[in-house]
Amino acid sequence: MKAILSLRRHHYLRSIGILLIVVALVAGIISCVPADKYELTMAVNPAGSGTAQDLTGASPYAANTKVDIKATALGSYKFVKWTAPAGTFGDPNLATTTFTMPAQNVTATAHFVGPLDHFKGYMVSQASPLGINVHLKDQFVDIDATVEQALGFANPTEKVYGQTTDISNPDHHLTVYNITCEGEPVTWYVEVHNQFGTQNLTVWGPIGLAVPTQKVAPGNHTEPLSLDHYLLYLVMDGPSVNVNVGLKDEFGNDPSAMVGQAVVFANPVQKTVGTTVTNIAHPDEHLVFYYIDNCQTLAPQVQVVNQFNTQTQTLNLGEPAVGLAVPSEELSFAPAPDRFTGYIVDVQPYIGEVVYLEDQFCAVNATVEYPTGVGYSATKWHNEVWTPISHPDYCFTGYTISYEGEPGTWQVEVKNQFGIQTLTVYGPVGLSVPTQKEGHEAPVGLDHYLAYEVIAGLPVNVVVGLHDEFGYHPDVLVDKPIFFLNPVRKTHDGVITEIENPEAHFVSYLLGVENFEAQVQVVNQFGEQTLDLFELYALAEPSEMLSWQPIP
């Protein structure tokens, strides 16, 4: 009997032991992730910009497991790339891709960017020059440049103007650097549209480079993803919007900032340093910087890192914002035409070349005879507006022409910086030929022009300052119009030179007589010529032809 009870007791204890082991195993399975599997967490940046999905949906995963993932942008945001502290992506630049798990818990983050933000611009003081050589290429220029000292810092800002425009990309910041460039600055006409309406700007430069920058402090910011570099152009002529806006950035709130004159146009640019090329991500996103006043918020020092400062750099701000960068659509752009100072040429040898000329007014077989004048691209000051040279290689030589048949007479209405004028013109009487100046490249993109004598037109009677290769001519009186220049198609020795800029015309005005003597060497389609100049006599002003009609 005792033996039977003993067997039963041992059987009972063994059953209890087995039950405890099973319970322990089940509890372990419920409460613990196996040691050889790791959690995958999905995240997005910035918050609210999109979603990040684990399509496989079986986390935790063993190391080296390939997981299908997908990023989906929300609203106006766009996917940029995936990042993770460990593990590898099939292609981090694709929204739908794979992720190979590392031997650790890990977070995969989908990064998105929203529309280009507004920026408050702060001045930087006491910055040392960098002296870094770069190659820059945008719509306007393709140049080598040197990046010098930091001049400004642009901070994303909320803007209130009728409605509130929130910050889309809080990690997007720009450091503005002064640059020195090879070659001459260029001038362009740019039509833009933004929240302040449609505006026509005359821009000149480039004068600076805005570089995407990570703000390390204050604040907890990451690298600015998908933010372009920008070449900066000075606005020579543009509107003053004169409106009040509310601006709020990381440094504080300016509820009634006054937005004034457009001062800088920012164009996205491709940048090359050494062999590293940073391409343009968003070619249609531009910025117009406006001067702002009535800002009280003081910006502190900021700690930044960018492609030119891989170590943290301190920028001293310490003053209220002076600029507002507004995202802008570029509607159109065109190179600004030059104006030309005209010099009389002393008697020169006969040319005697036969050409066929076709413009809006006539078509004639003509003989090119004697050079009568040379036109040099010039800078002009008029009514406190400075109009710089766009094309320093541009030059004309004017020739008399003869042809069979009678000259015609036309009435032409034109518009230029001197206003709208109605001219009666007669001819043609001459031909202006693109010419290469000594020490310059050949003028590319400059048309031939037929010259018509103005036989009726009112004098403008304004005083301007002019500067060309021969120096500064202050306080020059611009008198009556003397020639109207029309772009012309030319055939010479079987070679046809088509019109490149059919809307580009000139009106040549008589200047107050200024004695002058120089000898110049020029080359054009009629060969090399040495020309003796003896008088500054005319200003050829770029003009829009509003209408024209023949006079019987």
Image (spheres, helix red, strand yellow):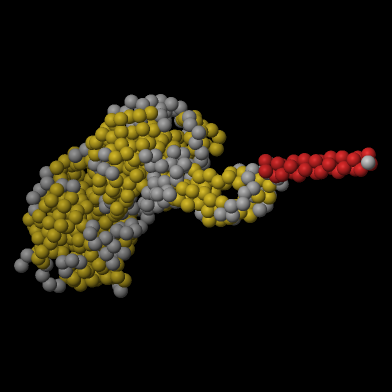
In front of the other: 44 or 239: 44
Residue 318, position as x, y percentages in the image: 40, 25
Residue 337 falls left or right of residue 216: left
Closer to the camera, 24 or 273? 24
Q: Quadrant of residue 512?
A: top left
The answer, for residue 411, to whether it is visible in the render is: yes
User: In the visual, does 28 lie left or right of 205?
Assistant: right
In this view, 510 is above or below 216: below
Return the residue found at the far left: 552
Please identify the quarter of the rendering in which residue 181 is found. Answer: top left
Outermost front residue: 1
Q: Residue visible at 50% across and 33% down?
A: 220
Residue 287 appears at what percent x and percent y? 35, 44
**Where does the N terminus fall, quadrant-wise?**
top right
Measuring from the top left, give residue 363's x and y in whole percent: 18, 71
Query: In the displayed structure, does residue 253 sit left or right of residue 476?
Result: right
Q: Position of residue 227 (x, y in %)?
A: 45, 45
Relative to 496, does residue 127 appear above or below in the rendering?
above
Q: Which quadrant of the structure image shows residue 301?
A: top left
* Residue lying at 50% horizontally and 45% vertically, measured from the top left: 44
Q: How many marks?
A: 0
Q: Residue furthest bottom?
A: 494
Residue sitting at x 68%, y 47%: 37
Foreground residue among 475 and 93 = 93
Name the quadrant of the C terminus: bottom left
Q: Inspect this view and state whether residue 92 appears.
A: no
Residue at 33% x, 53% y is 393
Left or right: 364 with respect to 72? left
